[in-house]
Every structure is written in C-alpha cells, then in structure tokens.
Amino acid sequence: MKTSMEKANRYLVNEEEREIENYIRRHGLEMVSTGTGLRYQILRKGSDEQLQQGQRISMEYQVGSIAGDVFYSSKNDGVKEFVIGKGEVESGLDEAVTHFHRGDYGMVIIPAHLGYGLHGDNDRIPEYTTLVYTIKIIESQ
C-alpha cells in the first residue's frame, strides 16, 4: 500500500511539474524557480525596499489556476494584508513575497503542495490546484 501511494504521489508531482513548465513556455515567461518548486517573475520593478520576514504588507492580487479560472482578486475581495512569515497565507505566497520589493508587480506560480494541497480552501479553490498569482506590493511596514 505504501509503495503504491508513493508512486501515485510521484506521478501527481511529475504531472504538475509538466503542466507548470508548459504554462511557462506557452506564456513566454522567464520565471525563477526556488528549491521548493515555487516560480516567480518580477514584471515591473518597484522600489529598492526588499520585503522581510515580520513585515506587514498590503498587495493587490488575482489568484487563479493554470487553466485560467480566477478564484479571488483584490478587485472583488479587497486588498490582501498579512505579516510575512506568520503563516497567515498559504506557504507558497509567504515564500514568494520575500523575493519582491515594495511596488513590484509580478507573477507567482505556486504548486499545490505550497498552496491548498489535497483539500483546496473549502470555498473556491479546488483540491490539488496549482495557483497562479499576479501581485503588486502596494505597502509594507
């Protein structure tokens, strides 16, 4: 049983990786990949103020899937505010913003294991969904 679960998980991870790479290629993106599998790209540079653990930030955003579904956005749901590193958002977003500066606008691809995993968010995000964020950091303290 354990071996078949490991094979199934490995298959899902490999499939997700292939989908992410295809998405990046189709959209002509030049994303940086971190050791966790997170990808990000700064599309428009803001200030020189690098975001740090413990800072409270505000950001405009849209989050959807690789398939193009939109789940949440600041236009509909308001600006997202959280303290970096406090576990107030999915771990992939927490990690991603540490690569941004105040005012930066960019894209982030969060694999399911860094997002909402096998259960989704029990609202709009389905289980095992790769998330695609566009974000703009508007404030940091």
Image (spheres, rainbow, N blue to C red):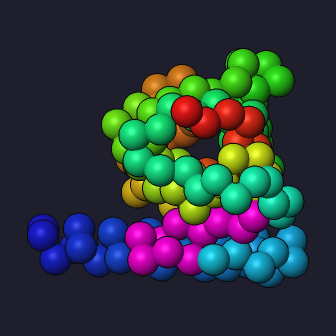
Is residue 12 placed above or below 134 in the rendered structure?
A: below
Q: Residue at x 61, y 36 (%)?
A: 140
Q: Nearer the viewer, residue 113 or 140?
A: 140
The image quarter containing residue 30 is bottom right
Quadrant where the image shows the N terminus: bottom left
Q: Is 34 one of the magenta-colored residues?
A: yes
Residue found at the far front of this picture = 48
Residue 8 image offset from top left, x and y in percent: 33, 71
Residue 65 image offset from top left, x and y in percent: 69, 50
Q: Nearer the viewer, residue 43 or 63?
A: 43
Q: Nearer the viewer, residue 107 or 141?
A: 141
Residue 48 image offset from top left, x and y in percent: 70, 59
Q: Magenta segment range?
A: 33-42
Q: Residue at x 53, y 66 (%)?
A: 38
Is residue 14 placed above or below 116 in the rendered structure?
A: below
Is residue 59 placed above or below 53 in the rendered structure?
A: above
Residue 43 visible at all: yes
Residue 23 image offset from top left, x and y in percent: 75, 71
The image quarter containing residue 76 is top right
The image quarter containing residue 41 is bottom right
